[in-house]
Image (cartoon, rainbow, N blue to C red):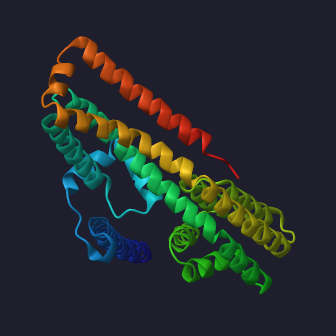
Amino acid sequence: MNNFVLITIGVTLLSCVFVVMGVHTYSAGRAQQAALVRRLSSAGELGHAGRQRRFRRVDRRLRRTKLGRRIELKLGATGLDFTPGEFFVYTLAGIVGVWAIAASLLASFFGPVAALIALWGANAFLNWQRAKRTEKFINQLPDLTRILANATQAGLALRTAISMAAEELEAPAGEELGRVANRLAVGHSIDDALSELSERLPSRELVVLVTTLVLSSRAGGAIVGSLRNLTVTLEQRKETRREVKTQLSQVTVTAYAIPVIGIGSLLMLDAIMPGALDRMTGAFIGQTAVIVAIGLYTVGFALIRRMSKIDV
């Protein structure tokens, strides 16, 4: 009987010890989680060089919507130091400002038209920044493949080679490879990390590089020889793209000059005959003519840009 009492007391004391240890571990985990949340929140509210984020409430609400997620993905590919909330507010303010300026300088009819053009321009600006960043990244691909080839030839693993390339290369290649290295460090596979990179900066050259690295990581093989051959090919494509861009520069300028000429003609007409735009857009036939003219200018701009776009 005495042994049973002693065993019961011992088990009870041991259970109490485990309970205390569990409560301590749970409290420490909660404290670490709270510290991590605070650190991530402060990182999200601060931009590059410690810039304080604006419109945090708008940003938090916007990120929950489909529009906010789309803006966040586009901003992530452009490398701009803006949150979705900041970009949304600035775009909205720009639309209102353009509406007021167009309505005061031209006519009240041109206010909504200018607002729609400003909305399209905001999206076009993100696409242009994304294309510009992708172009810079493509120009850095020969150096990237050369670094990866040298690192793998020296016996380093592919993950280590990517981290080394992220430290040596400048932006945007260094920043994008840094994201890939961070993904790999937290347990993501090479396939997923490189696939996300190719989705952010879509290009044929990057797809070829990603495919080469993924296949080499899966099946092995002569990755050094493949990377060196790819380096030579990328250098040749880089020179070809530069020559094509130079040859088509005049066509590109023409595409942007056509809409500018149309807007300039409207301003000239209103300056020569004050109030002419108000009288013209005051009738239904005048409004229809303006809308048709804007549509024709848009079609002309799109056709010229499409004809000057040559995939190399």
In front here: 47 or 249?
249
In front here: 40 or 130?
130
Taking 128 as reference, is 305 left or right? Answer: right
| Displayed quadrant of residue 235 | bottom right
Q: Is residue 292 above or below residue 52?
A: above
In front here: 49 or 251?
251
- The answer to whether residue 146 shows anywhere in this view is yes
Taking 167 as reference, is 2 left or right? Answer: left
- The answer to whether residue 69 shows anywhere in this view is no
| Displayed quadrant of residue 123 | top left
**Residue with the most extreme bottom position:** 154
Who's the residue at 39% across and 52% down the image?
Answer: 72
Who's the residue at 58% across and 39% down the image?
Answer: 306
Taking 252 as reference, is 22 left or right? Answer: left
Who's the residue at 67% across and 79% down the image?
Answer: 161
| Displayed quadrant of residue 266 | top left
**Residue with the most extreme top position:** 284
Residue 56 drawn at (x, y percent): 21, 57
Q: Is residue 297 above or below residue 7?
A: above
Who's the residue at 75% across and 83% down the image?
Answer: 150
Residue 141 drawn at (x, y percent): 66, 69
Q: Is residue 68 above or below residue 38?
A: above
Taking 125 as reference, is 268 left or right? Answer: left
Q: Is residue 267 above or below residue 228?
A: above
Residue 1 drawn at (x, y percent): 41, 72
- Number of numbered discs present? 0
